[in-house]
Amino acid sequence: MIKKIYTFGTSCTAGGGFEFDCKYDFLNKDGTKSGKTRGEHIKSIYSETPYTQEHYSYPGQLSELLKNKSYSIDIENISKQGYGNERIQRKFFELIHNSDDFKKDESLLIFEFSDLSRKEFYFNPFQNHVIMNYKADPDDTDMENMTIAKSYFYDSYEDYKAITKYYNVFKEFRENFISTDNELIEVSRKYYLFLEFLKYNKYNFLISAIPEIIHPNYFNQEDKWKKYTIEFGFDGHHKYNSFNLFADNGLTISHETNEAYGDPHPSLFANKIIAKMVFNGMIKNNYIEDDIIPIPKKINFNENFEQNPI
Amino acid sequence: MINKIYVFGTSFSEGGGFEFDIDKGISYAYNGLGEVFTKENFSFPGQLRKLLPNIEIVNLSKSGYGNERMYRLASDIVFSDNFDVDNSLFIFDFSHLGRKEYFSRKLNKHIVLNYDANSNPISLNGVAQEYNKSHEEYQKDIETLPLLDSNNSNFFSTWVALTYNEPTQHELCCSNATIFLSFLKSRNVKYLFTDPPYFINHRDYDNLLENHYIKFQDKASTHDYYKDRTITNETDGYHEDEHYGLIKNKLIASCIYDELIKRNMISGSKLNKNIKDFDNIQKIITKNTNYLNKGNI
């Protein structure tokens, strides 16, 4: 019986966009300072409490859903904005090797896998990892579009200064040692190796998002993992293998707030629906016994805004 | 029964030290043995090939490179549509820390950085596409590598100082090996070790390592087997190189042969070779090197 769910992933699982504790200035659309922090701005739009990134994420909403249905299943969300599959692997092994609380047979692992354009490094000045996000275009022509962070939206000015000091070293690394094509091969290969590892070792796991692009060398592996992949989509509409792709289609924070707060991550509403779809995925894969929660027909925020303008 | 063996590893599997194309002088020490003077032939996979003429042996080892290259090549073979899992065997010579692979955009190839993981600060032992080349070729190679000049490796010194952390690399090394071996298990791939990854978490030993050892007398690692049988010792100092000598490679090949028989992967009788069976070869090498060490060539 499942008693604990661990969710691994990127910002989309971490509750990206809902950085209520972010102290950075929130900028108006014209780039001027709004006089509010990003966190204050988000709070001025949303009313649901608690104002935490965790609560607004789909794992947070799934936790609420499970509680409301009287399940004793805890959720530990091990996701982090900006980071990707390398961190997922690292955190997974930290969990299974170092945590006394981890009980394999009672745990369900839900993975949101990332794509290219993320590369993790240990950074000695922080004695911690940092993440590089770079533009992965097929010809590697864009070397300028690159950011490094320890924790996007939460890094301090001191963190920023330390990273800036070595920015050119990372840039040299990007220019010389990151090839989009090779990275796609690496990401694809490692993704399938990791899935095989999970399967062989009989971990209970589901996939909430597959990598968007797989290198053609590994196309022959795709079908094998369908049964582990949760489907996301409105009733009677297209189904996605990734909850974030589902949300991209009109259910982002930007859509939900009618651009009052421009952010491409899944909206609170989307995360509530996603939580239900994950719940249904758990039923379909026999991790819980319950009735499937009906998913509504397609919802269009714009229609709502037309009827009820803010 | 198997009909194909893939060997993955480092210089110890590639035939490191027997670079006849760079130093023709090595061949003088091994004259009169009827051996073909190639690195491949002097390696243990090359010697195994002679014992198993009906089995295809593919040696994908490469000097200086380590586990990352093995995982890359071996998993891609398994992922390919035409991999014959039932009739194939993989043999792995694992390394540990000290080797880090990078993909050079400029060269469109992987390169490898070798470093001393036990030093503090980390000392670098060089970056290369190919180790064990002639001095001229090596210099040329170095010049084509990114961000390097012919005297030092400035970028990598900075990079390693900035990003290298031994415990983190060790953890990564462990998890990568665990994932890789689990993948092989998941796919029912037959595999054996000439050098096992003892660095993985002990709780995975039974599952991933046990039943995959080759018996080298009472050892499970070629590094521990006839430790003194280096090229240096075999040639009485004529060719100074700490890689395995020819006789050790012949012994390793015969141990693998016997292991395959024990596991019913091939048919035949065990060879049960021991070091004395190669006394004649050592005598010839000693005779050659005595002559050479007197400065005759």
Image (cartoon, coloured by chain):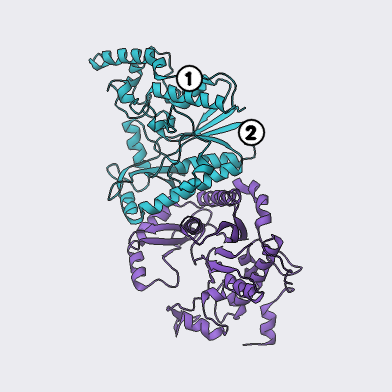
- Residue A27 in sight: no
Viewer-nearest of discs 1 and 2: 1
Task: Give residue B71's position: percent from left, percent from top.
Answer: 50, 42
- Label 1 marks which chain's residue? B
Chain B: drawing colour? cyan
**CA neighbours of label 2 inside 10 A, class few (<14), some (14 to 19), many (20+):** few
The residue that mark 2 highlights is: B86
Q: Quadrant of the N terminus of chain B?
A: top right
Residue A111's disc is: none
Instruction: Tell me: residue A190, above or below residue A72.
Output: above
Query: Chain in purple?
Result: A
**In this picture, residue A302 sits left or right of residue A27:** right
Would you say A297 lies left or right of B186 here? right
Can you identify the residue that label 1 sits on?
B272
Q: Mark 2 or mark 1, which is nearer the start of the sequence?
A: 2
Residue type marked 2: Asp
Picture quadrant where residue B280 is located = top left
- Quadrant for the C terminus of chain B in the image: top left
